[in-house]
Image (cartoon, rainbow, N blue to C red):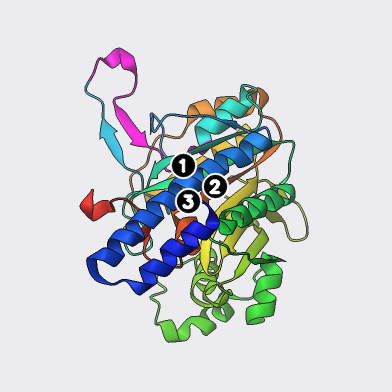
Amino acid sequence: MMPERFARHLAELHRCGGSRGMAIALNSALRLRACLYAQIRGFFAHRGVLEVETPILSAAGNTEPNIASFSTQFSGHVDAGASVRWLRTSPEYPLKRLLSAGIGDCYELGRVFRNGEAGRRHNPEFTMLEWYRVGWDHLRLIDETVDLIQMALHLVEKHATVYSSTYRELFVQRLHIDPWCAPVTALQTPLHDFQIDGQGLSRDDWLDLLMTHLIQPAFPADRITVIRDWPATQCALAKIRHDDPPVAERFEIYLGKCELANGYHELTDAKEQEMRFRCDLERRRQRQQVEPPMDRRLLAALSADMPECAGVALGIDRLLMAMLDTERIDEVLAFDFINA
């Protein structure tokens, strides 16, 4: 469906109420989703990036303490491998194994799963687009990610301005706080009115709260905001650049106040990756959380022939929400979690 036809669908939706309006909204959202998928595939085909499919069920889980995984039990023969299987929270680990095997630039557009995340803006089952560019750094990948978002906005006759800032610059400009050296009390003070229970919160937790409660909500609706070079303590799976102080070569991209994408100049050091996995598991142990097995196959791939690369994951449902000016994820899904 061409952009002008989507615009007519949306205009009709605003004129209609009740069940007819809901039916038009669902029709428009599903057609827009299908068109977006086709555009994404064309975008990458033109750029020579290969579409692949990787397993949804894995013998390894995500060790990240702030992400909860679903697990299930395989009842077949023991020769099939580990009986406990984890539903992927992203396709990152198998995609990196393909990179190590020499597949080259690749992407996957598919379903991922996160336990405990349900509400107006979250669904436990959602769609993620993740892709990797061999020989690129995170800065080059930022430009391509912005291009893809602008392409998507064109489908609904929109365009966004682009603003790029380092993490440090953003905090100084918006809150007059240097996130590298401000004492924790200085991070807590601006959040006083939110009456947050600070028991057990770390410095990074307070920085996250400043971002989600004070900085992110002020992003203009018609702007793509890029935040790059994060604290080294929030590196996830990104390389650390040894500036003074060190920074993680990581970026996040927002459309309006909605976080869309998280990308890295990817870590390729197996020993460093294993250390990060072990740190994650120790934090989980301290919190009395489930401890999924670390992905040994990923570590082996990193040790073998993992190329220098950059990768990014983008939430398709959130992109559709921004395209359709809604804050409800159920309005871009055929059936949300409660109706599945």
Q: Is 292 within the magenta? A: no
Which quarter of the picture shows residue 270?
Answer: top right
Residue that numbered label 3 is attached to: 316
Disc 3 marks which amino acid? Answer: Ile
Mark 1 or mark 2: whose residue is earlier in sequence? 1
- Say which amino acid is labelled 1: Ser
Could you say where residue 289 lies in the image, as x and y percent from the top left? 34, 49
Which label was assigned to residue 90? 1
Task: Note whether residue 330 is visible.
Answer: no
Q: Which residue is at the front of the view, 12 or 240?
A: 12
Residue 99, disc: none
Q: Secondary structure at mark 1?
A: loop
Mark 1 to mark 3 CA distance (whole Å): 13 Å
Q: Residues within 10 Å of mark 1 (few under 14, many from 20)?
A: many
Total count of labels: 3
Looking at the rendered structure, which numbered label has been put on residue 313?
2
Q: From the viewer's perspective, tell me whether residue 211 is left or right of residue 75.
A: right
Callout 3 secondary element: helix
The magenta stretch is: 76-92
